[in-house]
Image (tube, rainbow, N blue to C red):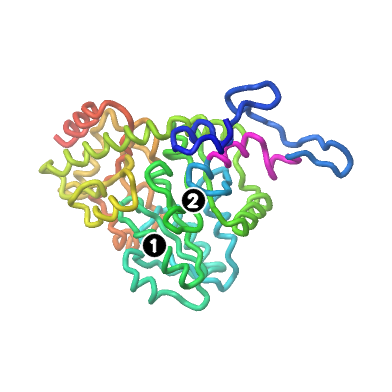
Amino acid sequence: MSQNNCKRFKTLAIHAGQPPDAAYGAVMTPIYPTSTFAFRGVGQPGPFDYSRSGNPTRKALETCLAALESGTFGFAFGTGMAAEATLATMFEPGDHMVVHNDLYGGTYRLLATLGERRVAVDYVDLRDLDAVRAALRPSTRALWIESPTNPCMNLVDLAAVAQLARERGLLTICDNTFLSPYFQRPLELGIDIVVHSTTKYINGHSDVVGGAIVVRDAGLAERIGFLQNALGTCEAPFDCFLVLRGIKTLALRMEEHNRNALEIARWLERHPKISRVHHPGLPSHPQHALALRQMTGFGGTFSFRVRGGQEEAFRLLGNVKVFTLAESLGGVESLIEHPYTMTHVSVPPEVREAMGITPDLIRISVGIEDVADLIEDLEAALA
């Protein structure tokens, strides 16, 4: 089946970029663990020449990712941070970026390092368009967005920010890891560049690390492709195979993650030991209306605050039996973590506090287990 014959998400996830193998008709995309490819003759390379520049297994994944994000060009990287680091090298010394002031700790660390060495970075609440306008300089080149944010689940109005950026000739970059292209497609809302940690929902089985970038513009694609090759940040063939394997069930998994997480969020919101739940699917979320407008679901990851501060938070973390205390998210198994001392510990304490990442905050990645077992686990741990 060619990509032109399939238009709907579930079909694209299984078929886009993945026709039966031309050599032997293999239905599943083969792994090509080769570093180099034979030329057809002197000065006559084939479609691939060296696996850093391109590999058939990686090409299948990149084509599929582009299709799922409504993009034209996809790029697969060794990790999500490799994808972000590649994007960061697009900018020149003296350039300026406006970055959302509530974001993943690893991204903050990368951009803070970048800001110290070559590119000026200002952290701004991108929910406030007037604040964004005030932060712009003649040297501003891009707006860097996370939506929903990790871990506080704040949303950015992607269409509004994209419109503002177009008026000023700026690039927009959006981390879409938390929702995957199943629940949100930023390119359709006017964003220029979408970035993912495919380690998370896209792969979905906690057995590989990877990253992705998807764009529509050919000029951007040419720049990103050159940097991916020059920096050697591409993903290995076997890892690409695993991500492709995970993508085939992405739609089914995301529906189950979404159902389970929303049920748990509603239950937690009623619990006397929980002071607040940060979940955009709840009417109590201050941007619930925006969530309904730009997302088709809410994903499986959210955060909540425990009454009693860090001591009670640690008690909960130490008492769970079904949830696993671990970093990362998006796998079929349920994970729980403490952002203040785990995923965001590299962020300076005063910045963590300003983000709303305080010792009472817990983030959970709700898996696809039976939701009754997950609620019973949290209930026993809170008791």
Q: Which numbered disc covers residue 100?
A: 1
Q: Is residue 67 magenta?
A: no
Name the side, left or right, on which 217 lies relative to 303.
right
What range of the chain is rendered magenta? Answer: 48-64
Could you say where residue 314 lies in the image, as x and y percent from the top left? 24, 42
User: Which residue of the protein is positioned furthest toward the bottom in this rendering?
Assistant: 138
User: Which residue of the protein is positioned furthest toward the right in this rendering?
Assistant: 42
The answer to which of 286 and 331 lies nearer the viewer is 286
Could you say where residue 116 lies in the image, as x and y percent from the top left? 51, 67
Please tell me which of labels 1 and 2 falls first in the chain.
Answer: 1
Mark 2: few, some, or many residues within 10 Å (few <14, many ≥20)?
Answer: many
Circle 1: element type: strand
Q: Is residue 286 above or below residue 94?
A: above
Quarter of the view holding residue 32? top right
Residue at the image position 58 percent from the left and 25 percent from the top: 28
Residue at the image position 51 percent from the left and 70 percent from the top: 169
Could you say where residue 316 lies in the image, as x and y percent from the top left? 22, 38
